Image (cartoon, rainbow, N blue to C red):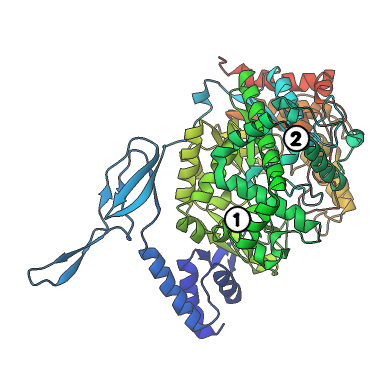
Amino acid sequence: MQPSHAPELHALAEAIGLVRIWWSSEGDEQTVSDASLAAIATALGYPAITQEDIAASLDQVRRERAEPPKMLVADVGMPIPLPPSLAHAEIAGPDGTPRSLDLSTWTLPPVDEPGYHALTINGHALTLAVAPRECPSVERLGKGRIWGPAVQIPALRGASPRAFGTFSELAEAVDAFAARGADALAINPVHALFAGYGHDFSPYSPSSRLYLNGAMGSPELLGLPPLPGDDAGADELIDWESALPRRLAQLRTVFAGLDAATRERIARDNAPHGEGLRRQALYDALDVHFRAKGAHGWQAWPPAYHDPDGKAVAKFARDTAEEVAFHLFTQWLARESLAVVQARAREAGMAVGLLADLAVGVHTGGADAWSMGDALLQGLTIGAPPDPLGPLGQNWMLTGFSPRGLARSGYGPWIETIRAALATSGALRIDHAFGLARLWVVPEGQPSSAGAYLTYPFDDLVRLAALEAHLANALIVAEDLGTMPGGFGPAITARGMLGMRVLWFERAPDDGFIGAADYDAQAAAMTGTHDTATVAGWWTGRDLDWAEKLGRLPPGTTRAEAEERRDWDRGLLWATLTGDTAPRPLPDDPAPVVEAALRHIGRTPCVLAIAPLEDLLAEVEQPNLPGTITEHPNWRRRLDAPLSVLLDNEDTAARVRALDEERRLTSPRT
């Protein structure tokens, strides 16, 4: 990039939403290099390598802005400004000379009913999406301050020994916690992974966010013969590498035994889900086929199969119709059995039922990336910029929506994604919700430090999420942990979404822990997340054991120094939890601290309190250690016994009662 081209490049970056100057978590100004701006702009579809490229791309931006939109997004009861592409007209004088009229100040009258409305302006047909002022609230559900556990479904055990938990075990968890006063049950993402593939098993690296993990489906919930027991069911850790291929084989056995009536039932239930579902099943069939030949991910398939609408894919679908039907069955099984669990939760009296989790992105080689094309970022992955906790930054090796693709599609992929997540739940947590405003994007093959922030149509995406929540009568929890973009917090609060207030991050200016009364009411109070140390693990220093073992202690800090700092923090935490009125437990005695922490989040004014199951059980190990892949057994841990047995344990039962009691103290119950 020649220096003389820089002003035009910077103008292009601003026009397409690339942030050239940003501030780190420490408040230091950072500048993205021109080389990174050019590479990212080019990947976004705006070539920027030469001066001629940049000029052509700026012209392209102007042309795109002149195109009428496919969707307008507005607020209920508010005037609707016309975008420039629709706010124009021409008038001809007596001599016939045409003259443009500026209608940029014109607005449409308010619409008082939230929903999607067909609209025609100047002969251009589009959709008008009118969002409610706020998302549904806990108060609207007729309850006071509610609580629920957060569970990792694969970790659950049931009466039948299985290699990992399924929606059957989730149904048992719903029954158990509903009986103990819970109104919600938060779950890990259940998005579609790669069928029968035992390596990409992280729930936050899905193949598709539109469809479900077929391995979690439960035939017995739908009146079919149950999956067989598994000798690996007694293992402490899940051996995904063998368990997922074995589960696929078990599902094939179930499918082979279906009678004609059940097949007709599946076809009937699947019919409303149309072409999208068929394409997902087709992707899974192709993935299994080509993976057997050593090609994983659609980019590794022969080029003729890269086009979902191409002749090669159509022929494959015809030639392998029974295989495609099998993958349609696994999607049906997962969707319908998860719906049974949610219905069971509501029938048991839960105000919310399942609180689903929406991953921030999808695997670059997965079904969404294959089928959605330009609606997703191409040639870019998402992550996080360098910061004190990650000096090299993070590259999650995921892709996400393209702002340009969203505009061209009338926001269809975003609406479908939210709608799919809410179809079988009563609430939704949006992982890394800052991504609604900006995402750190990195050119493929480059380090995270070569990335930049890409802005998104935040107001529209939030409005549409609120509209879908309104239509589903569901809560929205926006994960707002980390460095918050300007204006994000007030906008989320105004829209009625719940933030997240996690014990470990609720610190006062003097570095102490804030009191329960100081938590935000419009939030979910939590003792931790799947990415943080458990209360027992933190108190005993188990997280420090892992940090020392993996060389992850802060630079220049010895284990002894880390222990000294932890002991000071133990005092701060205990003082906040108890008012320092009781003797502080020793580091090897975490049980009183765990109960005190549960009571602490229970006392907060937050309308929702979430306790990870690991904290209710006083476990010292956490499900996931961020920044590790194989060094820590991420997403592999299992419970020691069936949940029903564990919850009947006297100490565990006391902890659950403690949280429920604190929630009930000031909450009117219906």
What's the residue at 47%, 34% (across, down)? 470
The vertical placement of 372 against 92, above or below, is above
Q: Helix, strand, or loop for circle 2? A: helix
Q: How many residues crowd around disc 2 within 10 Å: few (fewer than 14), some, or many (20 or more)?
A: many
The kind of secondary structure element at disc 1 is helix
**Residue 476: quadrant of the picture:** top right
Question: In terms of depth relative to the viewer, which is nearer, 338 or 114?
Answer: 338
Question: On the image, which quarter does residue 303 sit in?
Answer: bottom right
Q: Earlier in the sequence, mark 1 or mark 2?
A: 2
Q: Are marks 1 and 2 in contact (CB under 8 Å)?
A: no
Farthest left residue in view: 94
| Residue 172 in view (yes/no) | yes
In which quarter of the view is residue 290 placed? bottom right
x then y, percent, for residue 191:
67, 43
What percent of the width, then of the height, locates residue 182?
A: 66, 22
Quadrant containing the N terminus is: bottom right
Is 34 displayed left or right of 544 in the figure? Answer: left
Question: What amino acid does circle 2 point to?
Answer: Ile
Gap in angstroms between the C-alphas marked 1 and 2: 28 Å
What is the three-letter code of the residue carrying label 1? Ser
Residue 469 is tagged as none
Q: Write down the residue under mark 2.
A: 153
**Figure quadrant of the C terminus:** top right
420 vs 296, left or right, is: left
Q: Is residue 366 left or right of residue 27?
A: right
Circle 1 Cα neighbour tier, 10 Å, few/some/many (<14 / 14–19 / ≥20): some
Circle 1 residue: 371
Relative to 133, does residue 40 appear above or below in the rendering? below
Tag in front: 1 or 2: 1
Question: Vertical placement of 17 versus 519: above or below?
Answer: below
Residue 190 placement (x, y as % from top left): 69, 40
Residue 374 percent across, percent down from the top left:
55, 61
